Amino acid sequence: MLLHRYLALLFASTIPSSALSLPAKASAFNYKRPNVTIVTSVRSNHTTTSCNSNTTSTPIPIDPSYLMQHTADQVIKHLNLSIKAEGGYFRQTFEDPDKVPGSNRSLSTSMYYLIRGVEGPSKWHRVDVTEVWHYYAGAPLILHQVQRFENGSTHSTLTDLGPRMFQEKFPQVPQVVIPKGVWQRAISFGNWTLVGTTGEHLLSQA
């Protein structure tokens, strides 16, 4: 079952100490570090918090009705999505004509983003504005955030993004806010997940 493999990948690995030394500043696409998956336990100054998520290796049962009848390829073609640098497929749907004072940057943007389950988690990356993820269709996904503080400590958050807000065990949320500069990656629970993001400006990528 795909879900079992994903959760094994998600929760079986630890981030090496070297990977926790995230750069304070990094230009786009030039920061490299080991291929890591998801934080479960690291050094003592790192804390892990579960946010609407199962942080053990116990698989979360997925109702088949979460999955749509269409394939990822059909959705990608229908929405005219392109490959995204940090993994998955995207298309920008809106760019505010108003600009940030003193720059050519739009005040806000929005886009479609699709991630396939078989391709594993997206690459670690961060953006230089607050970003909001919205669930649209397909399987739920886990959104993993790692925030690094000035004292060198890190804080990890796992959030289930999906339609099942009222399920008794591990309820999901339809929207997640990611603060500016926080490292993030996502993994789909099923064949594919379609979300929307607003406020996207890529700062750097692991």
Image (tube, helix red, strand yellow):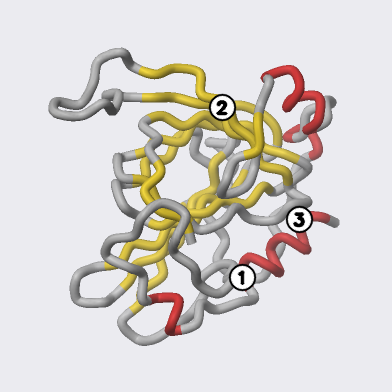
Locate residue 79: give its quadrant.
top right
Numbered tag placed on residue 3 in the rendering: 3
Q: Are marks 3 and 1 in contact (CB under 8 Å)?
A: no
Q: Nearer the viewer, residue 151 or 50?
A: 151
Q: Is residue 14 above or below residue 65?
A: below
Q: Which circle, 2 or 3, is nearer the viewer?
A: 2
Dot 1: element: helix
Can you name the residue that lies furthest to the top here?
Answer: 97
Dot 3: element: helix
Q: Residue at x 57, y 51 (%)?
A: 186
Counting from the top left corner in percent of width and height, residue 152 is at 26, 77
Q: Which residue position holds label 1?
A: 11
Residue 126 placement, left or right of 143: left
Query: In whole angstroms, how far apart are the C-alphas of marks 2 and 3?
Result: 23 Å
Counting from the top left corner in percent of width and height, residue 58 is at 68, 67
Residue type of the residue flagged with mark 2: Tyr
Q: Is residue 206 above or below residue 76?
A: below
Residue type of the residue flagged with mark 3: Leu
Residue 67 placement, left or right of 23: right
